[in-house]
Image (tube, rainbow, N blue to C red):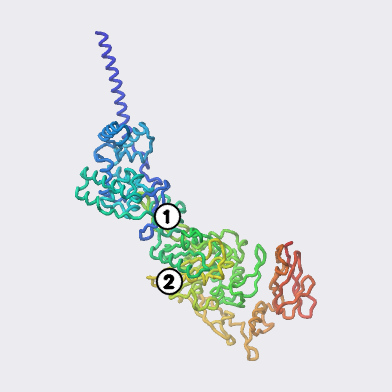
Amino acid sequence: MALETATQLEGARRAGRVGALACVTALGLIAVIAWPLPAGLLDADGALSVRVLDREGNLLRELPSRQDSRSVSLARNAPVPPVVADAFIASEDRRFGWHPGVDPLAMIRAAASNLRAGRVVSGASTLTQQLARLLVPRRRTLAGKAQEALWALRLSAHLSREEILRAYLDRVALGHDLVGVEAASQAYFGRPAASLSVGQAALLAAIARSPARVDPWRDPERAGRAMREVLDRMRRAGRLDPALAQLAATADLDLVPPGRAFGAPHVVVDLAARLGTLGLDRAVEVRTTLDPALQHDVERSVRSELAADPRLGQAAVLVIDNASGDVLAYVGSADFLDEAHEGQNDGVRARRQPGSALKPFAYGLALASGWTAASVLSDVDLEVGAAGGAWLPRNYDRRQHGPVRLRAALANSYNVPAVELTDALGPEQVLEVLRQAGFSSLDASAEHYGAGLVLGNGDVSLWELGRAYRGLARGGVVEPMRLVRAATDGLGAPVPARRELEPRRFLPSDAVALLTHLLSDESARAPAFGLDNALRLPFPVAAKTGTSRAYVDNWTVGFTRERTVAVWVGNFDGRPMERVSGITGAGPLFARVMRRAMVGVRPQPLVDRARFERVRICPLSGHRAGEACPGVVEEVFLPGTAPLEPCDMHRLADGRRVLALDGRYAGWAERERLEVARGTRAGDAPGFLTPRDGDEFLVEAGIPISSQTIPVRVRGAEGATLVVDGRVMALEGGRSARVPLRAGTHALELRAPGSQEPVQRIHVRVRGP
């Protein structure tokens, strides 16, 4: 009896321990299930791809996610499409609506099927378990399966059925690196998930069951059979009317051909590289500012212009809306896929020498510093000192034009006056204006660039040029350009893009207004470009061309009140083009694009001319016209800046009209066969124009000294004698000579006629072998 009682007591104790353990286990499971889900568990976290759209919502390109897949979330402000829910629930989890995350009946059914087959032929994972596996990857072990079940119970305890289904449909793999029903709908059918037919939804559910085997592009017959099987499951689950199931089984699925949209490729590549810089690393949809119709027409214009002139290699174009800063068209090359011409290079972002395209900013500074459109600049021999040695600027037409008014110098893009102007203003001041205008690529010192900065000896990008010229159109204020119109994250919340720079003024508005008047003067540019040139359009345009050294790069940039267009033409490998200038290379493309950009736009006046006063001046001296002046032009001036003095270059002598010029113009006047009044102007004393005292020159080994002569030019020196190291040398036309000099220091003297005493002596140094 005692033994029986002890046995009963031991059994009771064992049962108590088992019961206690069961209670503890149950409480532990309840605690685990009830524990709040980790923050950010359902975030996309790099799983969503980025859809880049034009301003009208058309897809340009879908960028793979950081997981190298294409994934798009279902619309957050709408329920899961019913037809999609029905297809996936019938196919994957018929009892989704009532089980707690795991389905005991399915587990029993699967176990029985697997035992009968002697291998795994059926699974029992619910949609919630599949979601748990996607959110928290596990090992394929019994412990891993238990972990998956616990996570499924947890998810069911904290999320609604709608939330679970949406999270699953956003993450399910659907073949071809597609993740999520929305991405697959757009890839396979070219439509959003909300617009899917019953058959299309069933096909996606069939792909989810076996993405490797069910491929509607590669094997449409097998895919069709899998789709019909899902339709039958939907019918048996009571989620689809039998008649509709039969109709859907034979309906056309409207599959789109495989492939990805790739519009505006340079824009897409540029944005992909700069998403983090722009603050858009969380964005899954980026709507650009591109106008699709304009973008298409500009791309076509680029190809057409290049095909029409075999000398042209590549081209890039920007079109900007001045009011908003929106980039309406962005073409980085003629053909992104053209490897022979390096089409994947982006001519909009590439840095190249801009030639004369920077001149307006130096002239704008001059106008802001007291110069006027009538101020006279010298277009004669000019030697410019620089860190690398002295150099002589040359005009595009290889001619000299004597005294030229600022208006004509800019309009005709004469190089010598521009360099003289920059030297007078100070290269450091011009460089500061350019940097304030947004040319951050000009990051070297003013000493590095020197006065040659205005001729384009610093590299800039077409983007910077377009932005700065838009700044001129905006009255001298540079503002950020906008390539991204809107962006949203995976939850549909807006993601603001960072601005590329803060707005700032770089030139006074009055000076810019006058500068714009000069840049739009068709008559003023006629001597260099003719009246019928590429910049002559049916509406007012302020524009400037640029040609870099050896015809490597062509530029034309200009603006109306409403649009700015920037064009580059050249070769990405730096090969020069055959005598193609900005007006003949980039100019025609600029004109074609500007005309198209202004379609539907009513052009407004570029400048309010009422802000200027008009004065009749001498076209040579820039002063008020006098009775001796052979011609008169009307010039505009900012209030209070018009000249008061009469012309002092034209005089009447013995009934004849003669010129009174500085000595620096003597050579030019002689070549032009102009009669000059002698001894009437300062500067007539004989002297060296070039070189200057202390200049250094370099001669190179292997090249004959006769091919490396030093240019010498003098003024006011009729009958004068040039003496080099004690040797008398002839002056061609009494004005110039080419002197061969070897390494060392050399003395040059200029002697008046009949005199052995020099009127000027200079020393130059030649370095070399």
Q: Does any portion of residue 761 appear in the rendered image?
A: yes
How far, Cα to Cα, is label 2 from label 1? 31 Å
Q: Could you say whether the residue bearing mark 2 is in a helix, strand or loop?
A: helix
283 displayed left or right of 438: left
Q: Is 68 situated above or below 477? A: above
The residue identified by callout 2 is 595
Q: Earlier in the sequence, mark 2 or mark 1?
A: 1
Expressed as whole percent of the image width and height from the top left, the position of residue 317 reads: 47, 65
Q: Does any portion of residue 696 appear in the rendered image?
A: no
Q: Give neighbour class at mark 2: few <14, some 14-19, many 20+ (Cα, 10 Å).
A: few
Residue 678 quadrant: bottom right
Depth check, front residue: 664 or 564: 564
Depth check, front residue: 120 or 632: 120
Q: Could you say whether the residue bearing mark 1 is in a helix, strand or loop?
A: loop
Q: Is 56 situated above or below 248? A: below
Depth check, front residue: 316 or 370: 316
The residue identified by callout 1 is 497
Name the residue at the bottom extreme. Answer: 655
Residue 676 quadrant: bottom right
Instruction: Classify the position of the C terminus by image quarter.
Output: bottom right
Q: Which of marks 2 and 1 is in front?
A: 2
Q: Which mark is residue 228?
A: none
Residue occupying image coordinates x 46% and y 64%: 318
